[in-house]
Image: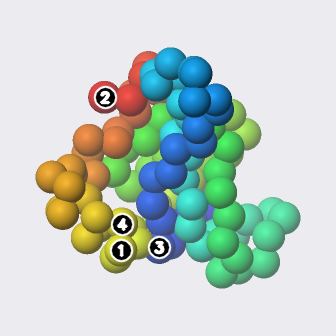
Amino acid sequence: MVTLDDWCVVVEFGSPYQAPELNRPALRGKAYGHPIHRNGTYVSTSRLLGLDTEARRAETKSRAYKLGNPDSEWLEWLEKNGYKMKDFDIEKDRSVK
């Protein structure tokens, strides 16, 4: 299983005319144990199908991820804007909570 460290949730915006619920959340972070990328390489995942920030697990169509430490700047942004990591959790086969 690939581990992501210094990770954060990012949203891939399609078109400015696209409905917000169609935007695609993904993760960005340093990958370890990835079959293609060298350890410590920053990667962006494909669209998230599941994200459990408490269990520190994420899933895309092609891979499962173990989540290490989140990015400190992202944590500061969350606090400043009144969010918690769990606000970005995604139940598999469901939309962002």
Q: Upstream in the sequence, badge 2 or badge 3?
A: 3
Tell me: 37 left or right of 5.
right
- Between disc 3 and disc 4, the foreground one is 4
Q: In the rendered view, would you say 74 is above or below 55? A: below
Could you tell me which quadrant the C terminus lies in? top left
Tell me: 94 left or right of 17.
left
- Between disc 1 and disc 3, the foreground one is 1
Cβ atoms at labels 4 and 1 below 8 Å apart: yes
The residue that mark 1 highlights is: 73
Cβ atoms at labels 2 and 1 below 8 Å apart: no
Q: In the rendered view, would you say 78 is above or below 32? A: above
Q: Which residue type does callout 1 highlight?
A: Glu
User: Could you tell me residue 56's position as x and y percent?
Assistant: 38, 55
Q: Which residue type does callout 3 highlight?
A: Asp
Q: Upstream in the sequence, badge 4 or badge 2?
A: 4
Distance Cα–Cα, label 4 vs label 1: 4 Å
User: Could you tell me residue 89's position as x and y percent?
Assistant: 35, 39
The residue that mark 2 highlights is: 97
Cβ atoms at labels 3 and 4 below 8 Å apart: no
Distance Cα–Cα, label 4 vs label 2: 19 Å
Whether residue 48 is visible here, answered yes or no, is no
User: Could you tell me residue 91's position as x and y percent?
Assistant: 39, 28
Residue located at (73% from left, 65% from top):
34
The residue that mark 4 highlights is: 74
The residue that mark 3 highlights is: 6
Q: Which residue type does callout 2 highlight?
A: Lys
Distance Cα–Cα, label 2 vs label 3: 22 Å
Identify which residue, 34 or 22, lies in the foreground: 22
